[in-house]
């Protein structure tokens, strides 16, 4: 008898009329394309090719890539109510927003393949709780698993304190889950030993934006297409946000309405497209963005090209600074961001202008030497974004940036980028916005409480408390219980090999190990480990990932995910959608909110008696009031209508509704963009609904005006000068590639086409650098950094003379380790001479790019400098791909 879950390799069935049609959104990048999941039983009559014969109401065949086209990668067979069902997950062919007409990326177009099917490469999904007994993970019951996690957690709290109980979790996997998790960590336990997946602490990604009063995701997607000049720093949206590029940017460029200015150390497909269409690429050395941005600003100021009238109207003045208004008055976790912040010029724009013109690094000759960008190109960039036309009109310029910018010199890069945008009159009107382009979707903007920063032992100059660096806290031996949810902690943090060694010492090398599945014995063994200075690790995920789950976890909890539960979140333009449940989770897997609720209740905490994900959603909504993600009016309105909030959100389909949501005159309204000075709509909500009337019109500061921020290079220069290549070293940086999502945990390892494209990680090297080292495309190479700096202490009441890297080195707070990475060489002039580039999140031990990167956070923000490292590279052999290109393409990515 044929397996009912076996998927045909020869044909794709069409859904019949009457099939279940559920709305969802792509689970991958920040774009959040709208999709429909169409489900019907295996064995039922299939749909026909005529519009009146199928559930989509479309005529087939349709051209590949067109709206409604169903490719083989969009079909799967899943379990629904315990029975096999066909499902096709298709981009919404009727979409009028985001992915208009059903466009999609290579990632979203294959999202149906991530659904669990026991006959595919997803068969290794976690299906039952696992306990590590005598070194081997064995199945146990949910009752035993949650009891062990709760009892050991309670013991650690009572015997070692709340800062010995740590949580490391994703920040994107739907608000119902992130709310439940942060509620336990922040509100119930009140620990500061906490960090999201892409950060060593609970620090903001773009503090320079925040201090300038700019919301990270203020822009609408249409702003990227409305701009006449689009500045893209540290990102290529074609590679990582494909639909934004193809739906909004590329048409504007091809129609002659837009020019692209890329700021990146390597040429990608998007850069090649820009240059072929009159755009400009500033190929700078990694980490030098601040200098380049200040040099562009200097050219603008020296020529008087700044938008004077706009600056006078929308940016803060001396009186507004001195009177204590502005973003800096808030109790933020960064000491520099207090009312005495020396990086905010006291007299607003005049002070900023004086600062820029006084900086040695902003001079063209100096900037050229530091950044490697010819001064002629710096002037050309300034002209593109700011030079008035003969008729007096100005170019409409939008500024979009991402991790390549803020993950190298975090505070100064984000501050200088924001100030350059303000100089051009951007930030609060259509086609003239400043924002992040985004990585993942926004599923963590509704925290279950406030991060209890007052408990942090870290201080800045002995004054205000700082967020806690969790990696450093573990290195120092203070964490006895680590609850890890959906993240590749080791590979995604810097100095990965050194961090892995610390984990190994605290877990597997500890003599206290579990020897029985009996709950009491397991609990006692883990208590003894905690008391001995070791660490207990609980890992919650959908796959057993390396090395947290496969090596270090004592307890592994199987999670349900996208498609297996009704869950919600917003995309990069704050657009909320419901991702509907359309199939059964595998085995005993449960949604994260359910798992954390069982543990919390067994620990004795109240407020976790949710019956379903909708109840979590309705509870968390009140904590979104006053922010970009305000959905409280939606929940309030649903209750007035006698509806569940999830069902109301579902009724908005793939269009969703943009936050902050506003209620007026019996209707709900979304907010297209934030800080919008052209917006005509504002509202005051009914009693019980908090709406900030001007949230869509003003900058995110007490007075509603934007702040210029200084970015003195000298605050970063000592680290940069120490780090920059010496001898045979080259700059090493990392990033993403179009085909692979994040760490590739549910696509690269489980999709044959990606396995064929990237069977092993590759490193790009310039032809001149390769020739000098005898390296050819297809060679196996080893990259070594024997001076990976790791900050191991210096977090208690840090002194002013220890703020600099030199001070930390002098005072013994830095140790040096060695990182090694292996890869396949691709020789290409797409990467500039002197720079190596590698995919950033391969979690296989030999290939973790972050093993080469120093673990020394930016002292102004506590964020890591993920994109900034050096390495020596040498040939160690020849790969099979050198002579068999069918196994792996070695072609450059600069094809358009």
Image: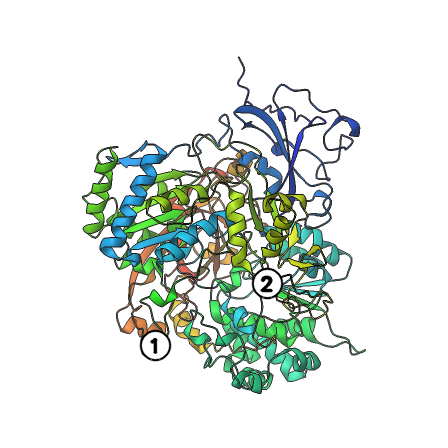
Residue at the location (46% across, 37% down)?
880
Q: Indicate whether 648 appears above or below 82.
A: below
**84 relative to 226 in the view: left or right:** left
Q: Residues within 10 Å of mark 1 (few under 14, many from 20)?
A: some
**566 relative to 385 in the view: left or right:** left
Badge 2 element: loop
Give whichever of discs 2 and 1 has the lower sequence position: 1
Badge 1 element: loop
Residue at the location (62% across, 34% down)?
74
The spot of residue 845 in percent (x, y) is: 37, 45
Q: Quadrant of residue 803?
A: bottom left
Q: Nearer the viewer, residue 12 or 159?
A: 159
The spot of residue 748 in percent (x, y) is: 50, 40
Q: Nearer the viewer, residue 133 or 231?
A: 133
Q: Quadrant of residue 124?
A: top left
**708 relative to 730 in the view: left or right:** right
Q: Is residue 884 visible?
A: no
Label drawn at residue 490: none
The spot of residue 11 in percent (x, y) is: 65, 24
Q: Indicate whether 366 appears above or below 248.
A: below
Q: Nearer the viewer, residue 849 or 827?
A: 849
Label drawn at residue 461: 1
Q: Indicate whether 759 appears above or below 723.
A: above
**Which residue is labeled 2 in the image?**
690
The spot of residue 856 in percent (x, y) is: 37, 64
Q: Is residue 78 visible?
A: yes
């Amino acid at each position: 008898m044929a397996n009912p879950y076996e998927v045909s390799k020869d044909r794709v069935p069409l859904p019949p009329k009457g099939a279940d049609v559920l709305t969802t959104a792509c689970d991958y990048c920040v774009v959040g394309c709208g999709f429909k999941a169409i489900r019907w039983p295996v064995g039922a009559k299939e749909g026909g090719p005529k519009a009146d014969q199928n559930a989509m109401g479309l005529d087939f065949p349709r051209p590949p890539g067109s709206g409604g086209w169903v490719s083989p990668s969009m079909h799967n067979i899943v379990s629904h109510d315990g029975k096999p069902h066909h499902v096709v997950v298709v981009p919404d062919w009727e979409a009028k927003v985001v992915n208009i007409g059903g466009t999609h990326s290579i990632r979203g177009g294959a999202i149906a393949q991530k659904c669990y099917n026991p006959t595919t490469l997803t068969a290794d999904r976690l299906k039952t709780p696992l306990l590590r007994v005598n070194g081997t993970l064995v199945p146990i019951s949910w009752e035993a698993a949650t009891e062990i996690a709760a009892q050991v957690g309670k013991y650690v709290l009572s015997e070692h304190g709340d800062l010995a109980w740590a949580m490391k979790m994703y920040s994107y996997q739907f608000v119902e889950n992130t709310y439940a998790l942060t509620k336990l960590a922040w509100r119930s336990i009140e620990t500061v030993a906490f960090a999201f997946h892409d950060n060593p602490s609970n620090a903001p990604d773009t503090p320079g934006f925040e201090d300038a009063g700019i919301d990270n995701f203020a822009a609408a997607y249409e702003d990227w297409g409305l701009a006449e000049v689009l500045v893209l720093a540290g990102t290529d949206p074609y590679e990582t946000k494909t639909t934004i590029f193809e739906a909004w940017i590329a048409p504007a460029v091809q129609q002659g309405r837009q020019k692209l200015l890329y700021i990146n150390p390597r040429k990608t497909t998007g850069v090649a497209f820009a240059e072929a269409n009159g755009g400009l690429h500033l190929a700078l050395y990694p980490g030098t963005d601040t200098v380049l941005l200040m040099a562009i600003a200097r050219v603008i100021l020296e020529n008087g090209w700044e938008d004077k009238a706009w600056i006078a109207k929308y940016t803060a003045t001396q009186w507004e600074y001195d009177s204590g208004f502005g973003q800096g008055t808030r109790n933020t976790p960064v000491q520099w961001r207090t009312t005495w912040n020396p990086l905010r010029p006291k007299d607003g724009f005049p002070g900023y202008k004086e600062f820029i013109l006084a900086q040695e690094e902003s001079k063209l000759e100096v900037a050229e030497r530091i950044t490697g960008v010819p001064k002629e190109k710096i002037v050309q960039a300034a002209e593109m974004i700011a030079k008035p036309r003969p008729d007096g009109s100005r170019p409409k310029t939008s500024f979009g940036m991402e991790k390549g910018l803020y993950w190298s010199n975090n505070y100064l890069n984000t501050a200088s980028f924001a100030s350059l945008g303000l100089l051009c009159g951007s930030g609060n009107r259509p086609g003239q916005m400043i924002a992040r382009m985004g990585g993942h979707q926004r599923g963590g903007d509704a925290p279950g409480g406030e991060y209890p920063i007052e408990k942090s032992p870290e201080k800045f100059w002995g004054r205000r408390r700082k967020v806690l660096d969790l990696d450093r806290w573990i290195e120092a031996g203070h964490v006895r219980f680590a609850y890890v949810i959906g993240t590749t902690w080791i590979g995604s943090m810097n100095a990965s090999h050194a961090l892995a060694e610390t984990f190994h010492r605290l877990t597997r090398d500890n003599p206290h190990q579990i020897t029985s599945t009996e709950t009491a014995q397991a609990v006692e063994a883990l208590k003894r480990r905690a008391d001995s200075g070791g660490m207990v690790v609980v890992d919650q995920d959908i796959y057993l990932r390396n090395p947290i789950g496969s090596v270090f976890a004592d307890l592994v909890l199987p999670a349900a995910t996208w498609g297996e539960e009704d869950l919600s979140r917003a995309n990069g333009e704050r657009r909320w959608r419901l991702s509907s449940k359309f199939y059964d989770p595998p085995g005993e897997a449960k949604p994260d909110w359910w798992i954390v609720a069982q543990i919390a209740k067994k620990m004795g905490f109240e407020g976790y008696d949710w019956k379903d994900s909708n109840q979590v959603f309705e509870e968390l909504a009140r904590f979104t009031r006053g922010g970009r993600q305000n959905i409280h009016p939606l929940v309030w309105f649903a209750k007035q209508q006698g509806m569940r909030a999830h069902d109301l959100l579902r009724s908005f389909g793939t269009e969703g509704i943009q936050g902050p949501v506003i209620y007026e005159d019996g209707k709900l309204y979304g907010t297209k963009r934030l800080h919008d000075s052209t917006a005509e709509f504002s509202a005051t909500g009914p009693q019980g609904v908090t709406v900030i009337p001007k949230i869509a019109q003003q900058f995110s500061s007490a007075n509603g005006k934007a702040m210029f921020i200084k970015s003195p290079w000298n605050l970063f220069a000592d680290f940069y000068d120490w780090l920059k290549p010496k001898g045979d070293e080259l700059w090493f940086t990392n990033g993403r590639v179009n085909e692979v999502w994040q760490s590739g945990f549910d696509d690269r390892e489980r999709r044959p086409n990606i396995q064929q494209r990237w069977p092993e990680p590759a490193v790009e090297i310039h032809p001149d650098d390769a020739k000098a080292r005898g390296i050819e495309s297809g060679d196996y190479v080893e990259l070594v950094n024997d001076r990976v700096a790791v900050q191991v202490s210096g977090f208690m009441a840090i002194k002013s003379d220890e703020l600099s890297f030199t001070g930390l080195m002098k005072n013994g707070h830095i140790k040096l380790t060695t990182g090694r990475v292996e890869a396949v060489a691709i020789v290409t002039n797409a990467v500039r001479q002197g720079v190596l580039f590698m995919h950033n999140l391969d979690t296989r031990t030999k290939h973790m790019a972050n093993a080469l990167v120093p673990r020394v956070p930016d002292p102004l923000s506590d964020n890591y400098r993920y994109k900034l490292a050096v390495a020596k590279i040498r040939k160690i052999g020849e790969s099979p791909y050198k002579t068999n290109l069918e196994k792996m393409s070695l072609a450059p990515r600069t094809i358009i």
